[in-house]
Image (spheres, rainbow, N blue to C red):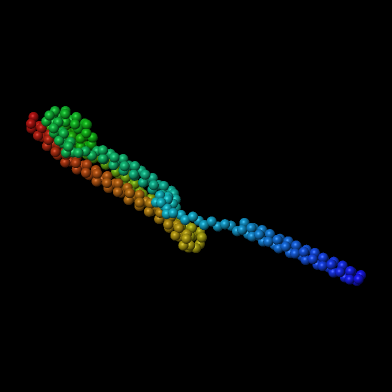
Amino acid sequence: MKRLIAFLTLAGMLTIGITNAIVAQDEVTNDTVAEAVDTTVVAEEAVLEEVPVVEEPEAEGPKSFHQILKEKFIQGSPGFMGIVLLCLILGLAMSIERIIYLNLSTTNTQKLLNKVETSLENGGVEAAKEVCKNTRGPVAGIFLQGLDRHDEGLDIVEKSIISYGGVLMGRLEKGLSWIALFIALAPMLGFMGTVIGMIQAFDDIEAIGDISPTIVAGGIKVALLTTVFGLIVAIILQIFYNYLVAKIDSLVNDMEDSSISFVDILARFSLKK
């Protein structure tokens, strides 16, 4: 009996010990797994923190003409590009001033001739002078000059009209020589910038000791930008210059035709007197 009790006691103790060992082992295993999971999570977070987030570049829209022109201007030689731009600004300013002056000088010559003739018949020379004084333009100035010399004879009137017409023609052509200078100067400055840019490109090749396509292409590109810009400026100013020349020719033709008609009117008025 005592042996049975001792056996049962020993068996119970062994069962309790094995159960405790298993429970302890399970706890250790769970703790190890938890620690491993925590370590894995921490490692993954660290990797995510270390890996830089690459942001996809936003798709740029098409550049405007102003942006492209600004980039090309900056890429070119600032010194020569600035001088060429100054030629463009001055040339455009003078062209616009001449256009305004010539448009204000344009008059309806046929209407003016009719008014002068009517004034001569109704009010005489003084009335015709008032009509000319109240009318702007070189044609009215020529008529006024002829009326002032009416008493001296038609020959003097014709000579006076011719002389004063030459003075007015000089006023109409004022500033055209400067515009022509800017037209010639702009491409010349562009070519000079190109030559200097090419020299700098060859200096870079000599300094490196090797011909690199990048250096050669970049230097030539920058050098040619000044030529392109200079030619663009010359083309723009040439258009304005041709318009001004055509406008002046039209005014001069009106002055000549109206002067002949004016002398005929004065001749008929003198015969009636």
Q: Residue at coordinates 37% horizontally, 54% vertically from top-left?
A: 228
Q: Residue at coordinates 45% horizontally, 60% vertically from top-left?
A: 216
Q: Is residue 272 above or below residue 232?
A: above
Task: Give the quadrant of residue 39.
Answer: bottom right
Q: Residue 66: horizontal and vertical position, in percent?
A: 40, 49
**What quarter of the picture does the C terminus occupy?**
top left
Camera-nearest residue between 4 and 29: 4
Q: Is residue 179 left or right of 200 when viewed as pictured?
A: left
Q: Residue 175: horizontal and vertical position, in percent?
A: 30, 41
Q: How many marks?
A: 0
Instruction: Name the residue at the left extreme.
Output: 272
Q: Is residue 237 left or right of 4 when viewed as pictured?
A: left
Q: Residue at coordinates 28% horizontally, 39% vertically from top-left?
A: 101
Task: Give the quadrant of residue 269.
Answer: top left
Instruction: Name the residue at the front extreme.
Output: 1
Q: Residue 86: horizontal and vertical position, in percent?
A: 38, 45
Camera-nearest residue between 143 and 191: 143
Asked whether the viewer can see residue 47, the reply is yes
Asked whether the viewer can see residue 162, the reply is no
Q: Is residue 131 above or below residue 59?
A: above
Q: Is residue 273 left or right of 76 when viewed as pictured?
A: left
Q: Residue at coordinates 47% horizontally, 60% vertically from top-left?
A: 214
**What quarter of the picture does the N terminus occupy?**
bottom right
Q: Residue 240: horizontal and vertical position, in percent?
A: 30, 46
Camera-nearest residue between 167 and 46: 46
